[in-house]
Image: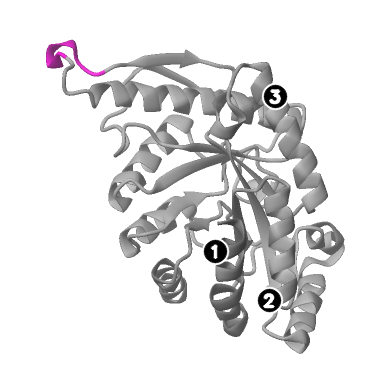
Amino acid sequence: MDEMRALWRWLDDNGFDWISAWDHIYEAPNEGGIHDHFEAVATLAGLACDTSNARLGCLVFYVGYRNPGLLAKAAITIDHLSGGRFELGLGAGWHKWEAEAYGYDFPRDGIRLDMLEEAVELIAGLMNAGGEESDPSRNQGDGPARISFAGEHFRVSDASCLPPPVYGSLPIWIGGVGRNRTLPMAARWANGWNAAYISPENFGDLNQHLDHLCAGIDREPGDVERSINLLFAMGADEPRAKAAEDTVYQSWGAMAERVMGGALLGTPDRAIEQILSYVGAGADLVNIALRLPFDTEALEAYQEVVMPAVRSEVG
């Protein structure tokens, strides 16, 4: 934890726009829970208190691990700890091994997507209920706004959600690459959409599909921010870049080929080209997925060389 806290303080002080933690109990890819792992909500609370500049989030919380109402309350608490910098990411999950190890039901994909859709609607309703109370002109005698929701998987009954987020509402992100379920949810409910470990071509195709879905419900596509997670496998020079790539294959095994399609590889010059290809495909944010232990020199090269070059290019 001390090492992570030092890392995110450095990130916050050195121009990084977004710092996220993931919501896993075991390592990914799964090795049967042999590596240290901290719980996401508590970690993000510490992150909120240790930083002051970057936006904070989780890409993404699996909705099967927590009651959505309680997750909304936790998110708002972290938002207040951070001074209004927190953004809530939600997803349908994939890590069945950790879920089974900890006794969580892990139903088939379609049911988990149903759970996600209910959770997003419920959480959005709670956020709006809290936001109404933030209006100073409201008659306090009326009491807080309340919602009821009765789904197949989740429910709340006459529930208020106070205090509201710092700025009255909390951005909601939806993560995933499913064209038929996930992207329509993002078009309807989300302030942001996140994809992980896919190529620029795939990202661009899904991004255009999301634009089309937004237009189909009379929503401005620009209202949904777009981000891509890339595995950080860059090196400060060619030998270190080759070593980083070899490490990905060693640690990811059979899954390596899939994630390598969405990995930041090579030297800083190549990384700049890769990132700009995602920007050209519609990405507003590019997140690098750091795994301890990471190459400190590579991260410094990313901060000193890659970030300024990309920002200069995109304005």
Q: Quadrant of the C terminus?
A: bottom right
Amino acid type assigned to the residue bearing label 1 in the image: His
Q: Which residues are magenta?
A: 139-144
Query: Residue 156 at x, y = what percent?
Result: 42, 20
- Is residue 95 shown to the viewer in this render? yes
Front residue of this view, candidates 279 and 50: 279
User: Disc number at residue 213?
Assistant: 3
Query: Residue 214 at x, y = what percent?
Result: 65, 24
Looking at marks 2 and 3 on the same chain, the residue that comes earlier in the sequence is marked by: 3
- The answer to whether the residue labelled 1 contacts the one labelled 2, judged by CB atoms less than 8 Å apart, is no
Amino acid type assigned to the residue bearing label 3 in the image: Leu
User: Disc number at residue 37?
Assistant: 1
Looking at marks 1 and 2 on the same chain, the residue that comes earlier in the sequence is marked by: 1
Name the residue that disc number 2 marks: 268
Q: Residues within 10 Å of mark 3 (few under 14, many from 20)?
A: many
Relative side of 179 to 89, left or right: right
